[in-house]
Amino acid sequence: MSVYKEFIEPNNAYVANFGDKGKLPLPPAKKLAIVTCMDARINVYAELGINEGDAHIIRNAGGSAKDALRSIIISQRLLGTREIAVFHHTGCGMLTFNTPGLRKLVKDADPENPGVNAIDNIDFLEFPEIEQSVKDDVAFLKENPLVLKESTITGWVYEVETGKIRQIV
Amino acid sequence: MSVYKEFIEPNNAYVANFGDKGKLPLPPAKKLAIVTCMDARINVYAELGINEGDAHIIRNAGGSAKDALRSIIISQRLLGTREIAVFHHTGCGMLTFNTPGLRKLVKDADPENPGVNAIDNIDFLEFPEIEQSVKDDVAFLKENPLVLKESTITGWVYEVETGKIRQIV
């Protein structure tokens, strides 16, 4: 059973109760971009009281600001956001491996295929400690000449055990 | 007024009703990774009937599969997902600009700062048409030797005007 077949019924219900959300403009109403992890336990809307139309939500493995830079530039320069909130979280998968180990795992799984050597070009951006990684990501954004100087940038930890957010920077 | 100050009160309410979500495991229950756009109008959980713990949610400008590759590899190899659903959407900002134009805009805004020339290293991954971009992204994943061959990969359009999803591939 492929999970995608389960999208249709809830989507029909969402469409039936869509209301006037179809009139929302493209630029985020709160001029806010959130960067957070792809982790399955993170429900950004519920956790922060965000609604459709409020904020760009950028998610990747770890909630890496470096990985999010392309999206942040588009968000700021073309769609008017001026605030960035970076969230990393307890129990993150990024704390459990390192890039050389993952490269080896992928190459060992398909040793006859030279195409897998492309993995050597990917930095997986893992980190050993989440409060420090939040500080590092906020510093990366504050120092980056491609990020607007007038941006408000904050850094947070989300606790998957409790649902609680905690401001670090 | 910085928007981040508005996170605290809704988060307190989320924590108060957190229930047993703190016991959810790290690997996504549905073995699913969703790739979609950062667009503020997209509420992935509501639109697809997804709940905490179900799926990795990867979001970037456009819902680019190429930009998501690092996250997808981590999702598949370390956290067991075997299905990928790529969503692009109507009214996407990626249809409204091109990389040379955005590079010029950023450089013209800060002409005295040589640091902004780093923008020339960023491909903004814009596209001119969303059904084709969905097909291209699914083909990119199916052909990529770093993506597991046994993956189920589907491609979709989300209509911001109606909330409706439409399968393309």
Image (cartoon, coloured by chain):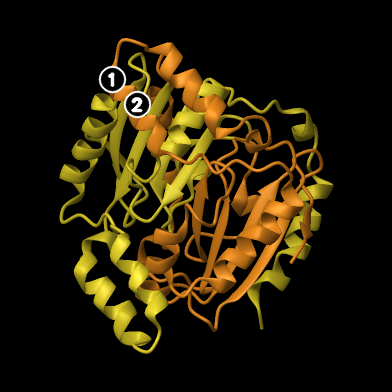
Chain colours: A yellow, B orange
Residue sitting at x 45%, y 30%: A73
Amino acid beneath label 1: Pro
Question: In the visual, does A126 lie left or right of A148?
Answer: left
Residue tagged 2: B117
Residues at marks 1 and 2, CA–CA distance in whole angstroms: 6 Å
The relative height of residue B75 versus residue B112 in the rendered view (above or below) is below
Is disc 1 surrounded by few (<14), some (14 to 19) or many (20+) residues within 10 Å? few
Label 2: which secondary element: helix
Amino acid carrying mark 2 in the image: Asn
Compare residues A92 and B101 and report the one nearer the observer. B101
Chain letter for mark 2, please: B
Task: Note whether A23 is above or below B44 in the view shown.
Answer: above
Which residue position is annotated with label 1? B114
Name the residue at 81% across, 56% down: A12
Q: Quadrant where the N terminus of chain A lies?
A: bottom right
Residue B11 visible (yes or no)? no
Q: Quadrant of the C terminus of chain A?
A: top left
Q: Residue furthest bottom?
A: A112
Check disc 2: other Cα within 10 Å, few if <14, some if 14-19, many if 20+. Answer: some
Quarter of image, res A137 = top left
Horizontally, residue B127 falls left or right of residue B12, namely: right
Viewer-closest of B146 and B44: B146
From the top left corner, tell me how far across and down residue B87 is, in percent: 65, 54
Task: Establish if B41 lies above or below A13.
Answer: above
x%, y% of residue A20?
79, 31
Confirm or deny contact between disc 1 and disc 2 (CB under 8 A). Answer: yes
Where is residue A18? Give x, y as percent. Answer: 78, 41
Q: Chain of mark 1?
A: B
Q: Is B55 on the left-hand or right-hand side of A6?
A: left
The quarter holding residue A138 reads top left
Q: Position of residue A67 (x, y in %)?
A: 37, 46
| Disc on res. B18 | none
